[in-house]
Image (cartoon, rainbow, N blue to C red):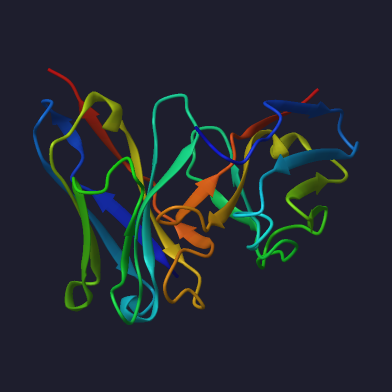
């Protein structure tokens, strides 16, 4: 069974940093691209970052490029999102999502999602 | 703001057919496949339709997707109370640096 479990969220002051983790199980992480998607309270879904499976190509939404970094550790079956220079507008529930097996250089579709971890940026 | 436009709401009585539209442009729907996600109240999104009209295993066949030009649509036939929730279309957008875009979302209410 495929499982994705996010952690690392919390309350942080503007300008601060957080590192989110996504622990995966039930599949070989190295074969799949992974994504982070966020949802601000009462709002819609926003894709923010992607890392490909075999080549580790990374992509970012304009709203986070230069501030957020996606990475993964296949030995630990985990994907990470390092978030720096956080702003109030980054407050959201952050989801980790597995991409389709055919995704090689850009997101295609997300066939499994975690339950999310909440990030609140406030002073 | 999202580049994929959906109606904010849709509704129907049990058993009715409901259709949700998703309007985009040449750089997203016009060039790439459309996917649909369902988000039931208080839960994470799940994949409902992929590659325009394919259903993942476990998704009932009363959900169907289609695409024409720069628009797509999701149809729910035989609406059920458990279908109440938010629905999002999504596609890769080739413009600028490239980005995966979600639609504005449609809240489906079962009357």
Q: Nearer the viewer, residue B43 or A105?
A: A105
Residue B55 picture location, percent across and down:
71, 64
Query: Which quarter of the image is occupied by the C terminus of chain B?
Result: top right
**Rendering quarter of residue B56:** bottom right
Left or right of residue B104: residue B19: right
- Is A50 rendered above or below residue A88? below
Which residue sits at x=23%, y=66%? A78
Percent across and percent down for residue B29 are 66, 54
Residue B103 appears left or right of A122? right
Could you say which is closer to the camera, residue A40 or residue A112? A40
Residue found farthest to the right: B16
Image coordinates of residue A104 in percent, x first then y, are: 43, 77
Question: Quarter of the image holding residue A67?
Answer: top left
Q: Image quadrant of residue B57?
A: bottom right
Please report the residue visible at 39 percent of the width from the left and 70 percent of the height from the top: A33
- From this view, report whether residue B103 is shown above or below residue B99: above
- Is A23 on the left-hand or right-hand side of A16? right
The correct choice, above or below, for A74 with respect to B89 in the image is: below
Which residue corresponds to the image point at 35% horizontal and 80% vertical from the top-left? A28
The extreme top residue here reads A123
Q: Is residue A84 left or right of residue B11?
A: left
The total of numbered circles placed on residues is 0
What residue is drawn where x is 58% and y is 38%?
A: B40
């Amino acid at each position: 069974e495929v499982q994705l479990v996010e952690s690392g969220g919390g309350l942080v002051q503007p300008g601060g940093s957080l590192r989110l983790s996504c622990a995966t199980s039930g599949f070989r992480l190295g074969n799949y691209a992974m994504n982070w998607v966020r949802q601000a309270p009462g709002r819609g879904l926003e894709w923010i970052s992607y890392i490909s499976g075999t080549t580790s190509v990374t992509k970012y939404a304009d709203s986070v490029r230069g501030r957020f970094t996606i990475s993964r550790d296949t030995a630990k079956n985990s994907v990470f999102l390092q978030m720096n220079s956080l702003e109030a507008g980054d407050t959201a529930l952050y989801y980790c999502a597995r991409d389709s097996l055919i995704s090689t250089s850009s997101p295609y579709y997300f066939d499994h999602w975690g339950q999310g971890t909440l990030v609140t940026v406030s002073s | 703001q999202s580049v994929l436009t959906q109606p904010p709401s849709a509704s129907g009585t049990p058993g009715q057919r409901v259709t949700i539209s998703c309007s985009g442009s040449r750089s997203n729907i016009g060039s790439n496949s459309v996917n649909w996600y369902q988000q039931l109240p208080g839960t994470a999104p799940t994949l409902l339709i992929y590659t325009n009209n394919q259903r993942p295993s476990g998704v009932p066949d009363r959900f169907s997707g289609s695409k024409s030009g720069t628009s797509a649509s999701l149809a729910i036939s035989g609406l059920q109370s458990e279908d109440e929730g938010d629905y999002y279309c999504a596609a890769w957008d080739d413009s600028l640096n490239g980005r995966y875009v979600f639609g504005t979302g449609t809240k489906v209410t079962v009357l």
